[in-house]
Amino acid sequence: MDFTWTNDKKPTYAAGKVWQELKTALQDEEGVCYHGHPIFSAENTQLAPDIMCFHKQWGLYVIECKPWRLTDIQNIQNDVWFINQLQESPYSTLEDQLYNALSHFTREKRLRNGKNNLIEGHLFLALPNIYRSEWEKRGLSHNLDKSHHIIFAEDLKPALLKACLQKLPEEEQQMPLTEESWKIALSILKGSNILKREQRSFAQKPDTKAAYLQNVEEQIQLIDSEQESIALKIPEGPQRIRGIAGSGKTVVMCMKVAAMHIEHPEWEIAYTFYTRNLFGQVKNLITRFYKNWSHLSDRKEPDWTKIHILHGWGGKDAPGLYSLIAKNLDVEPLTFSEAKNSFKFKEQSELLGRCCKQLLDNKKKIPPIYDAILIDEAQDFHFDFYKLCYVTLKSPKRLIWAYDEVQSLESLSIPTTIEIFGTNKDGSPIVDLEGTYKIGENEEVEKDLVLYRCYRNPRPVLVAAHIFGMGLKRAQGAVQFIPTQGGWEDIGYRIVEGKFEPGQKVTIQRPEDNSPHRLETLVGYENLVKWQAFNDRNEELDWIARQIATNIKVDGLRPEEIAVVCLDWRQMHESFNKLDFKLSQRGIQVIIAGKKGNKEIFHEEGKVTLAGIFRAKGNEASVVYVMGFDQVDTNPKLIVQDRNQAFTAMTRTRGWCILTGTGGKAKALFKEIDEIISSGPDKITFTVPDPKTIQRNLDSLEYERRRNRIKKVKDLSSKLEGELAELKDTGLLQEIIGRLQVMQDKQNKNQ
């Protein structure tokens, strides 16, 4: 069973005691268990029960934990408990919460058998300070309904607790669930059901792209336990989320905002990002999660005066995080054009960083405005943007950022937290991501997390994008690299054989569990990434137009499911205008992302999307054409950026990826892709490059942790040296020297 503590509140003694015993008693059972799950907001209140447990065989349990002793209870009359001169109705509250929870299941037809519901619910009151014998001696059991169950002090032992939960009257016992019913129920509880795509009309022709996608979309997709745990746990300070492309970073961040807003409706929360057209997607996801967790009779919108969805920069048409903070300081924010004229930098992230630094250097003190700031696409922001966000946060500085360094389109640096935020006067890091935040004695929230499963991209797409992006099959050698086994495991690969030493062969594999996309099974690993080289760009555009027409008229895809991403930024506008014309001749309309109208729109019903890489980032489509592939590696100084852009473009697809380009350059690059795909997912072999020959090391996080550990050891060493100097105990000194020598000998032996 998966156990998730879903809020930032420290447990009461009663709740903590029951929670720990449940973790022991049910650890081998199939199900999920939460403390304070937001779906359990009862009508007219946002208070959730202490514990909710959903067991595959037994049903749904709502458990409230009370610290009462027997002497605290004066009397029980029907549902009213007289506690220390006060009146409480614990079961009435539990009934409201259970009804709200079950209502999420009952409206799903597949979880009903005629008029009967497949999911049974149970009400439990936990009284860990009261024994059953003294309770019965007082004769209090006669005052309870038989559906009102109690967990007593003597029940808090694994076997007895398990028996207590199973001891249910016949009318409450749940019929066995099929595997499909169980997955449906879990998807509702976890909120996965709101991610389900709009059902497409029945695909008339078998063996078409629409038919295959329909098959995939009919499968029940669950938010996994890692995603859910990260989303529902609120940190008491900064938190970093590293996730590969397609791992659900944006979904997790939006879930986190919705959970925070339900738990703390008074908080000011900012969600910021780099790509303008993410706005609609982010607002939609936050709204859907919030409504899913709200009571059915009160499904209103989130309070958008408390949740602020903001582009990192902002502009004349819409505010951004930077521009809002500037105006708060009575400073006129710079637009992109103004910043470009003011600073001698070309990169947008650098320009925004300079603007942020001006605010940080302003004589006026920046007031704390937000209770939490979440940064999506964090790899594309400058250090000073992070610093500005950090300064504008209230204590305890809940700055949460999600990123994938391989999708960085401009900067090559992978900064450590010390490089970003600096150090205190004593040399300690201002932001320390080592360890966890404690919630009570036994619960923790991780400070630094990794999402390694990819749900968007089929496995061959992700593997090809990773290996090509690093240049591991490039004739001239790799351009960036992950030099450790742990680094590869962090992004979901397994090491088959070989050592990570320069010149050595290493074989890795990507397990299907870490890329659980059904499309590979339906159409074959080798059929999801395709490529085609042409003599010139016009020939390339003609072919793409014909293929898109086939996708729509033969494969049954909707136009808005198709995107064309151009890597040739010099000829992009000309190419898109030509492609627009060629498609219009076939009766197909397009939207050129960011060209005119609403800059926040990427998809439009009935239209194929044409986008540059900066507009495409953060979005997805069923079929993605990556054109202008011949532009990769054209500038020796920008090889890593070119490969990152290719990686980002390829990983926009949730289905097929088609690469096109011109001339011998494209053919040479496609030779790399061919070698990657033909090797399959289980035997990906490459030569470990010499660190001196690569332009970028992709594993600095592990190095950062190592450096932090080294610093701690040095600090302890200095402290030990001072203590020994004061003690002047030569015997103790010789003992420590001897132990250190033994450690040194062991290390020498292992080298």
Image (tube, rainbow, N blue to C red):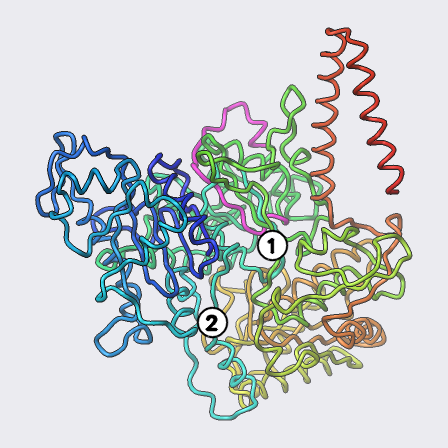
Q: Is residue 322 magenta?
A: no
The amino acid marked with disc number 2 is Glu
Would residue 188 be seen by someone viewing this image from the given angle? yes
**Most foreground residue, 149 or 529:** 149
Position of 588 relative to 595 (above/below): below
- Circle 1 packing at 10 Å, graded few (<14), some (14-19), many (20+), is many
Residue farthest to the right, as pictured: 503
The disc label shown at residue 243, or none: 1
Going from N to C along the chain, the mark reached first, 2 or 1, is 1
Q: Quadrant of residue 283?
A: bottom left
For label 2, the SS is loop
On-image quarter of the C terminus: top right
**Most foreground residue, 408 or 207:** 207
x, y (%) of residue 747?
Answer: 85, 37
x, y (%) of residue 612?
Answer: 63, 64
Residues under labels 2 and 1: Cα distance?
Answer: 28 Å
**Most foreground residue, 6 or 541:** 6
x, y (%) of residue 367?
Answer: 45, 28
The amino acid marked with disc number 1 is Gly
x, y (%) of residue 110?
Answer: 33, 76
At 56% from the left edge and 45% from the top edge, which residue is drawn? 401
Would residue 194 be seen by someone viewing this image from the given angle? no
Q: Left or right: 410 with respect to 235?
A: right
* Residues drawn in magenta: 358-379
The disc label shown at residue 517, or none: none
- Circle 2 packing at 10 Å, graded few (<14), some (14-19), many (20+), is some
Which residue is the site of mark 2?
A: 604
Q: Quadrant of residue 245?
A: bottom right
At 80% from the left edge and 25% from the top edge, which residue is drawn? 739
